[in-house]
Image (cartoon, rainbow, N blue to C red):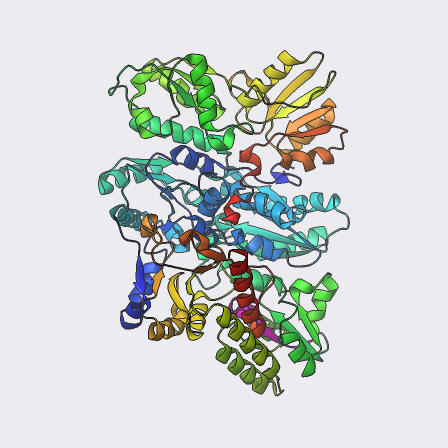
Amino acid sequence: MKGLMKYLSPFASDISGAVAVLYEMGGLIVILDAGGCTGNVCGFDEPRFVHGKSAVFSAGLRDLDAILGRDTTMLEKTEKALKQIDAKFVAFIGTPVPAVIGTDFQALTRLGERRFNLPVLSIDTTGMDNFDKGAEKAYSAVLSKFGSDANTKKEDKVGILGALPQDLLPGDTPELIAKRIAICENADYVLFNNLIDFQAIGDIKKNVVIAPSGLKAAEEMNKRFDIPFEICYPVNQLFQIDIHEGDRVLIVHQAFAAESLKQEILQNHSNISVDTATFFISGVNDKSIQLKEEDDFLLLIQKNNYTVIAADDLLRDAVNAADQKTRFVPLDHFVISGNDGELYDV
Amino acid sequence: MQQPLFLTAGQIANGDYNQFLKDQLPSSSLIYSSPATLAYNSPGAQGYGVKRAGLTMPESIMLLVSPGCCGRNSTILGRRGGYSNRMFYLNMNETDLITGRHLKKISDAVLEILEGLSPRPKIVLICLTCVDALLGTDLERVCRKVEKETGVIVIPTYMYALSREGIKPPMIAVRQALYSRIRRKPVNSHAVNLLGYFAPLDDHCEIYPMFHKAGLTMIRELSRCNTYNEYLDMGEANFNLILNPEASPAGEDLLKREQMPYIEISRFFKLKRIQKQYKLLGEALGIKLDDAKYLKETQSLIKNFKAGHPSLTFSVGQSLNANPFELSASLLSYGYSVCDIFASYGSADLPFIFEIAQQSPDTRIYSGISPKMYYYNAEGKVDITIGKDGAYYHPDAVNVPFCSDIQPFGYCGVNSLFSEIDTILEENA
């Protein structure tokens, strides 16, 4: 049934994706919820939460705030917080509550900027889309508000888009990926995890998009600032998946990582076939099979007799349910299986 | 540098505490998110939230009908807590929000889930979240329809975070839901139900032998019921004993609906309070509850503990099996120091705060959710933090989580506390 998850459980939502992009930018992030969404984002979808401070707040909405549309109260609380915390901007992050009551995010931005005398971003995430959609929206919002090639030193850096810690292959971090790319490009890099990266776009000679969440921003930068981009996830040469000759392989991950992994496998092995699939944005040319529902995944497995499925461990139960005699190879994807408890061992 | 928000116990006792209470509420401020306040936003992160609590019902599964983000924590917690095979999700999209069609899908979803399960569950808990609160969904009506169409018992539960300071916050509502299927059976005068917690009391809790000795030989707890029929046997209880105030409305429901009387007692850590409470309980029940032996054992344990640790300074959080203010007042009464308390307080906590103020007016009380906590840095020399969140506030101190699922209560609870502190201090020596 559409929407029903019997074997899987919910992935990180667009709310988490938006927060992930903004997390290190020095803004005051206000999630427009009652508290639960913030708890999920911080406690389960943000690996940096335990180790680094970020000014992430819940708006603490209560029933009457939502029913009466008391945006003024929320703005007052934000203004009060800004008197206590230094922030470069304010970001309002949408959740199902503002989605239900039809919050006007554009108006919120205008009201907020007038009131706080600070830039305000309002990201209309809903909690009903996936992580990458929220990240995509956040990248676009920051680019639109802060993107400028005015402050340029013509440094010829390479920009890396989509390098969020939640959306990488196992063992990778944004910095490791960046270094791999920087070596290939023989240039310094920016990760677009800082406002200055957007404010000095003129320093960037080329963007490398490693996850579909960064694709739209790359296209916008290409259009506005004439910066070319390339789609490529540089797989760690030491990364191995246990594959044998004759295998029919399915890789499930974010589309660009899955595709890069596929190419690595095909280069290093003969007589195998590899499909890639994703529950997230499939990206350019739909190289990855788009999965929307749990049933799509079950059907894909049942129809294709894969001998190896490389996917996040959370998908194992679904693979078993499809009753295929496949070899399951865990391929962690934080956006799927989330924080596995480091927070609770504080 | 901004200063975090705290007041001393003395300031609260002598000041406008009604205003202080208001200042802590989410209606006044944004809620700061730190690892220590995670359980405030997401109660399931530490212990029991609505979803895990609902699955205390034996032979049950839960279907969460919500936007995908609402079920996210269960993705992780379900696997850690071993109940992921009992959690199912019906994800809503924006069209569902506008049309309400997600409600029409529930029966088919339940049937599809039940098809694949063996043994077949007896109960399906349907859980809705904030969006349905705003849509005004009549979940009870929906559940009655689903029950009729599927032939399985369907119980509504609500994860309405929007109403957590309202008349019926989620953790009160889920308790009412869990006890809602108890029906009166012929009364067994030797039977009593312990209501309020989602996990059993410690097996060594003196309530069990004291009650047995007094003739209450059939003591039931929801969490110890392995089958739905055992749960239904709770209907024969002479009375309900409520151990957690969040179960009071459930007790009231059972009184009104099934004429099952109830008595409330509380969890304390000060021996005099425990003793007095058992005395009053015995008087109310018309039985003698002989707690002398247990009191003596605990007094001896505390004496030995104090001999080994004559002088300790504590910091108390709020993610623990205790009321942080009552616990702090108790620790002070045992001759220890309490440097700070990280907890939001309500009017029910004021008597304990006044008690703290009398013994230690400089004890600081922080609201962990205040935006000012962004600038918090640990201050003061603290030996031990109690509560899982305590480790965040004083990372250099020894942390005693005291937050097990198994519930401490009474003298046994005090024994557990000091034993846990002792063990952890030894491990860190």
Can the viewer see residue B156 in this picture? no
Q: Is residue A60 above or below residue B187?
A: above
Residue A114 on image: x %, y %: 22, 39
Q: Could you tell whether B60 is left or right of B262 in the image?
A: right
Q: Is residue A252 above or below residue A116?
A: above
Q: Is residue A64 magenta?
A: no
Asked which quadrant contains residue A293, the reply is top right
Residue B416 on image: x %, y %: 57, 67
Q: Is residue B247 magenta?
A: yes
Read off the magenta span. Answer: B237-251
The residue nearer to you, when weighing B32 against B184, is B32
Residue A252 on image: x %, y %: 61, 27
The residue nearer to you, when weighing A3 against A272, is A272
Q: Residue at x 55, y 73 (%)?
A: B301
Q: Is residue B163 above or below residue B64?
A: below
Residue B189 on image: x %, y %: 70, 81
Total labels drawn = 0
Q: Could you tell whether A46 is left or right of A116 in the image?
A: right
Q: Could you tell whether A226 is left or right of B150 in the image?
A: left
The residue nearer to you, when weighing B422 against A281, is B422
Q: Residue at x 64, y 13 (%)?
A: A268
Asked which quadrant contains residue A240, the reply is top right
Q: Residue at x 54, y 53 (%)?
A: B44
Can the viewer see residue B125 in this picture? yes
